[in-house]
Image (cartoon, rainbow, N blue to C red):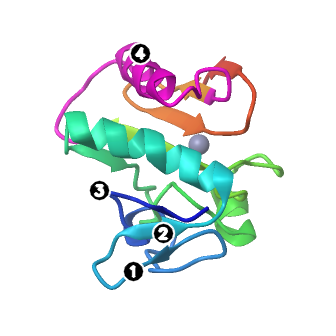
Amino acid sequence: MLYRSKHWSVKEWDCYGRSRNEYAWDDETEHLCTDNEKTANLFRILDMLRDWDPRWRVNLTYKGWNSGYRDEYVNSACSGVWDSYHKKGCAADIHIGGQDDLDTELAKTVMVAAEAWGLQDKLGIGLYGDWIHIDTRGYTSRWRG
Ligand SMILES: [Zn+2]
């Protein structure tokens, strides 16, 4: 099934800012499209977050990479775990721009969005202070970074 994101482009999620990668592509109006179910689930949640607050952002690493989809090179350079969900097209490190909300508050908001899609038992969430990692791996996992 094709999913077309309401609020996000591949450019702001792909590590190199490309408009296409192995999991998703931007249409002519720069809306992310995917036919991967886990990628679609990630953006179902991310779309709902931006419905509520358009300032939700994918983190930028100190080297200028978007911390969303990563290829092998960027994942290693970011010290990501070898089987990172960032490489599997279903993860993003996110925060609300201009805000310093606590990770626990961000995670709570993500869970409300997840429940709306019936995805509450399918998420990996990592807490990192003022940002969080989320992935739609298909089962529950929680950690503090
Ligand atoms: Zn992450």
Q: Who comes first in sequence, dot 4 or dot 2? A: 2
> Which residue is painted at 66% across and 19% down in the image?
142
Q: CA distance from mark 4 to mark 2?
A: 26 Å
Q: Which numbered disc, 1 or 4, marks the residue closer to the eye?
A: 1
Residue 129 vertical placement versus 70 (above, below): above
The residue under label 1 is 27
Residue 123 lies in the magenta stretch: yes
Magenta range is: 96-124
The residue under label 2 is 33
Identify the image quadrant of residue 74.
bottom right
Which quadrant holds the C terminus? top right
Q: Nearer the viewer, residue 96 or 119?
A: 119
The residue under label 4 is 108
**Residue 2 % position (x, y):** 55, 65
Identify the image quadrant of residue 21.
bottom right
Q: Nearer the viewer, residue 89 or 144?
A: 89
Q: Nearer the viewer, residue 94 or 121?
A: 121
Residue 41 vertical placement versus 77 (above, below): above
Q: Are marks 1 and 4 in contact (CB under 8 Å)?
A: no
Q: Amino acid at mark 2?
A: Cys
Q: Which numbered disc, 4 or 3, marks the residue closer to the eye?
A: 3
> Which residue is painted at 41% across and 32% down in the image?
131
Q: CA distance from mark 4 to mark 3?
A: 21 Å
Residue 116 lies in the magenta stretch: yes
